[in-house]
Image: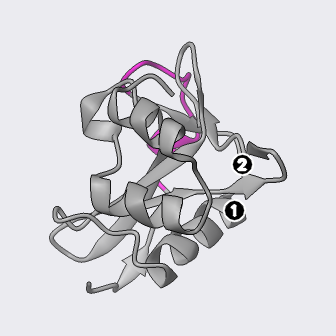
Amino acid sequence: MKLDSYKVNRKHRDQVAKADCTQWIVSEWEEIRLFTVAQKNEWVCPKNCLWAIEKNGMGYTELGRTDKDLAYMAKYVTNHNHEWHGYPVTPSRSADRPPTVVLDSWRKREIISKSQQGKIIKGKW
């Protein structure tokens, strides 16, 4: 995975949250920190996206929101210049569901349970 730079995308910070454009509610520093956690843990999919989640005690950090849901996961993508940006996601959209390889890693690290993995795969978490 090539990393040239990371850019905070204002589209996911300065707009009203919508079903197709989530908005971060954590700080920019948290956004970037989670990116480095995802990179360090190699939570990457075959499409070269990175995925992140953060467990805090018995729950998960609220990273962002859509027009009606809170988002507890983040997806990071890169462009042709190897510049990365990320946004919070909910699994209700099939494109925003982490792949099995990432979910398996989260389960192995006890970040999510088997039943939570099943719910994410079905888009119901």
Pick the quarter of the image with the N terminus: bottom left
Camera-nearest residue between 1 and 112: 112
Question: Circle 1 — which element?
Answer: helix
Q: State whether residue 26 appears in this view.
A: yes
Q: Residues within 10 Å of mark 1 (few under 14, many from 20)?
A: few
Q: Which residues are magenta?
A: 9-20
Kind of residue at disc 1: Glu
Query: In the rendered image, which residue does mark 2 sit on?
Result: 26
At 15% from the left and 70% from the top, the residue drawn is: 80
Query: In the rendered image, which residue does mark 1 sit on?
Result: 30
Q: Residue furthest front?
A: 114
**Where 47 falls versus 112 (above or below)?**
below
Looking at the image, residue 119 sits to the left or right of residue 3; the answer is: right
At 45% from the left and 42% from the top, the residue drawn is: 117
Q: State whether residue 50 appears in this view.
A: no
**Where 99 falls versus 109 (above or below)?**
above
Q: Position of residue 31 (x, y in %)?
A: 61, 60
Question: Circle 2 — which element?
Answer: loop
Residue 12 lies in the magenta-colored region: yes
- Residue 50's mark? none
